[in-house]
Amino acid sequence: METDIQIAQKATLKPIQHIAAMLNIAEDDLIPYGKYKAKLPLTYIDENKLSNSKLILVSAITPTPAGEGKTTTSVGLSEGLNKIGLKSTVVLREPSLGPVFGMKGGATGGGYAQVVPMEDINLHFTGDFAAVEKAHNLLSALIENQIQAKDPLVQIDSSTVVWKRVMDMNDRALRKIIIGLGGKSNGTPRETGFDITVASEVMAILCLSKSLMDLKDRLGNIYIGKTMVGKPVFAKDLKANGAMTALLKDAIQPNLVQTLEGNPAIIHGGPFANIAQGTNTLIATKTAMSLSEYVVTEAGFAFDLGGEKFLDIKCRMGGIQPRLVVLVATIRALKSHGGIGKEELKQENVDAMKIGFSNLEKHLENVSSFGLKALVAINRFPTDTQDEIDSLLALCHEKNIRVSLSEVWAKGGEGAVDLATQAKAIIDETEVKPLQYVYELDWPIKQKIEAIAKKIYGAAAVDFQTKALSDIKQIEKLGYGNLTICMAKTQYSFSDDTKKINRPTGFTLTIREVELASGAGFIIPMAGEIMRMPGLPNNPAAENIDVDEHGNILGLF
């Protein structure tokens, strides 16, 4: 069986000008990065066309560590829509080097449902992540300089600084560090650390900005800490946002590439979904919606994380909404939620699959709570038995759940013809109504958090620890109580406990602290310990990546 990279390297790619022509983009407007990549100007966003485009959100049930194939399904669905004669563009996040060299590998789809050139996209691509990293760390350097200078106008209390540094790599040794050692000329000693670039608020800001000037304003609103007299300090107080914007002026432009079958793909931005909003840039989505009849996009992890944030944060801020949610499920994940261990997932077990079906049902209920229709895509794996497939399809039909067996990994767009046909039919027959958000922005912060915990996660109660209550009071005192909520919790459970699989009930969600991301425009309640700087596994994917004498990259997956 060929690997993903072998399949991708055998593909004959079209010049990027041909892909642009499919979207009626003038060649003179392209900013080429080689033969097969290009950046697009923001001028192609047409707010008047957004309501005519059919946006499809691809989400998933609660994942297993291996992932359930949202990106593969997203690419395959877009291929399928094009195959049945519709004009579709897939819009995705850019991969982070941390997972690429760590445990998960790349994030460009798989098998015959990929975006290409996959090596470029998975590695440096067009330099967007490097720009985010540099802009973030510029602010870090300016903060240290301000502390060192002891400017009486903005005299920062170094013990209150919440802004860390970032790098796009998994390196656990940098989670907690001491800086400023070696004497006064080297700065003020204090404890800080590194986060991974995709957890940076700058990344979240880039992905929610509507224009270059909106980006500049949001960067200026980043909360840094306090002065010696307790006054809040923001990036604009250090005159940092102008230079930060200069570093991001090219990164804000979306990237155009193609699928294996030569259809358009826009890939831009990449915030984590268990810390930030977990979806591509608002600019990329709006660009695709301005240029295509159908747009397929995805949100990170399961619907309770990426899906809820896509709707309550991105859609609310951007004035867009999907016409349909495609919910990806796998038989192996359902068996996992049915209590089967990893080593036994390849063995047939219809009973366990039926037990794990409760997880799928809860996610479907959550989709419905927003007033949206759902279509379940069963992402088929070689280990799925016919009895398991037949039983799952029968169970869905018995409960009046729209479902399609997706075989995009093995067959590309041909494996998504039924999925695409059903998606079109549901969109055509469904009246467009305003989204029913989980909470209103003017609710108190605690009420908004409780609404998500109880309605989306199924929690019986929320326990706000002392630090969280103090944080909420401070945020409301600063005047930011009306922001959206961006929950931070594990992706492996509806609860904050990874061991509570399937559909847990009666649990209490514990909020230990609450952070302010005033530039991004949301508040981050922390449920449990969330890793912002992952570590490498015992056998990282980097060990398998190599380059041959001709410069071909090997071992990327």
Image: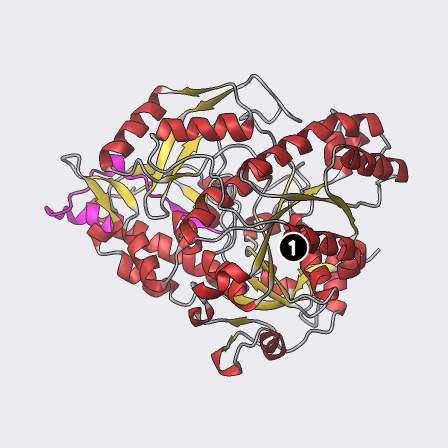
The amino acid on which the numbered mark 1 sits, given as a three-letter code, is: Asp
| Residue 232 appears in the figure | yes
Residue 57 rendering spot, x and y as whole percentages: 59, 50
**What crowding class fits label 1: few (fewer than 14 Cα within 10 Å), some (14-19), or many (20 or more)?**
few
Q: Which residue in the rendered view is the most extreme toward the bottom?
A: 28
Q: Name the quarter where the C terminus is drawn.
A: bottom right
Q: Which residue in the rendered view is the most extreme toward the top?
A: 506
| Front-most of residues 425 and 539 | 425
Image position of 26 with respect to 57: above or below: below
- For residue 186, side relative to residue 309 (left or right): left
| Front-most of residues 114 and 329 | 329
Is 230 inside the magenta-drawn segment? no
- For residue 441, side relative to residue 60 (left or right): left
Q: Name the quarter where the N terminus is drawn.
A: bottom right
Is 145 inside the magenta-drawn segment? yes
Q: Which residues are magenta?
A: 143-168
Q: Which residue in the rendered view is the most extreme toward the right?
A: 386
| Residue 72 appears in the figure | no
Rendered residue at 77%/57% (across/down)? 417
Residue 502 rendering spot, x and y as whole percentages: 67, 27
Question: In this figure, which residue is indicated by the disc labeled 1?
Answer: 428
- For residue 263, side relative to residue 40 (left or right): right
